[in-house]
Amino acid sequence: MRDPRLVAALLFDFNGTLSDDEGIQCAIFRELFAQQGRPLSEQEYFDVLAGRSDPEIVERWLGAGHPATADVLDRRVQLFRERAGDGSTVPPHVRESVLRAAGRSRLAVVSGAVRSEVDMVLRAADIDVFEVIVSAEDVTR
């Protein structure tokens, strides 16, 4: 019989939990939206957009069907890779906790983030120890 005090699995969000990257996300969207003539303040980002999927962020700020949507989304991915791709957004205490937990429980990431970004940061931070990763591409709704 399994010890009820043991945790069977731990599920982690990515942006803002494993990866302390909301400041980077905010800066990227502010830059991209300003280029589209629709400036965004830091306060507006955190009040209105933070925590949403990338397509939803762009749609809410630029409007549904905006002609630059695909370009903005592609550029956001490029900029994130440049600014967070080295794994430095994973704080040391998070890395240590994940590695400690990996020996004791099953681990998963459940996130609205893009899978390639999750994989890239986890590898770069040397915490690619998750059995399952569910990302934006894995969910239709």
Image: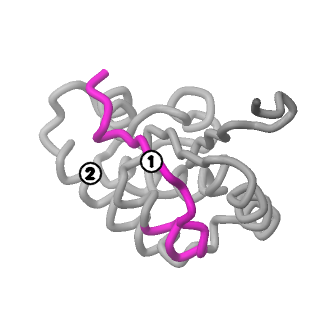
User: Which residue is nearer to you in this view: 23 or 98?
Assistant: 98
For label 1, the crowd category at 10 Å Cα-Cα, with few meaning under 14, some 14 to 19 and many 20 or more, is some
Location of the C terminus (image quadrant): top left
Q: What range of the chain is rendered magenta?
A: 120-141
Q: Residue at x 39, y 42 (%)?
A: 135
Q: Report which residue position mark 2 lands on.
A: 72
Residue found 43% across the figure and 63% down from its top: 119
Q: Is residue 101 above or below residue 62?
A: below
Residue 128 in the figure: left or right of residue 11: left
Residue 75, image x and y in percent? 28, 60
The disc, 1 or 2, on the residue closer to the chain's N-terminal end is 2
**60 relative position to 43: left or right:** left
| Residue at 39% over, 67% down | 79
**Residue 140's spot in the image, x, y percent?**
26, 26
**What label does residue 64 carry, if any?**
none
Q: Pointer 1: what residue?
A: 133
Quarter of image, res 138: top left
- Please name the amino acid that badge 2 sits on: Val
Marks 1 and 2 close (CB-CB < 8 Å): no
Colour scheme shown: one colour
Residue 97 inside the magenta-drawn segment: no
Give SS at disc 1: strand
In whole angstroms, how far apart are the C-alphas of marks 1 and 2?
Answer: 25 Å
Q: Position of residue 28 (x, y in %)?
A: 46, 57
**Seen in the image, is 101 located left or right of residue 89?**
right
Residue drawn where x is 54% and y is 55% of the image: 130
Amino acid type, label 1: Ile
- Quarter placement of the N terminus: top right
Q: Residues within 10 Å of mark 2 (few under 14, many from 20)?
A: many
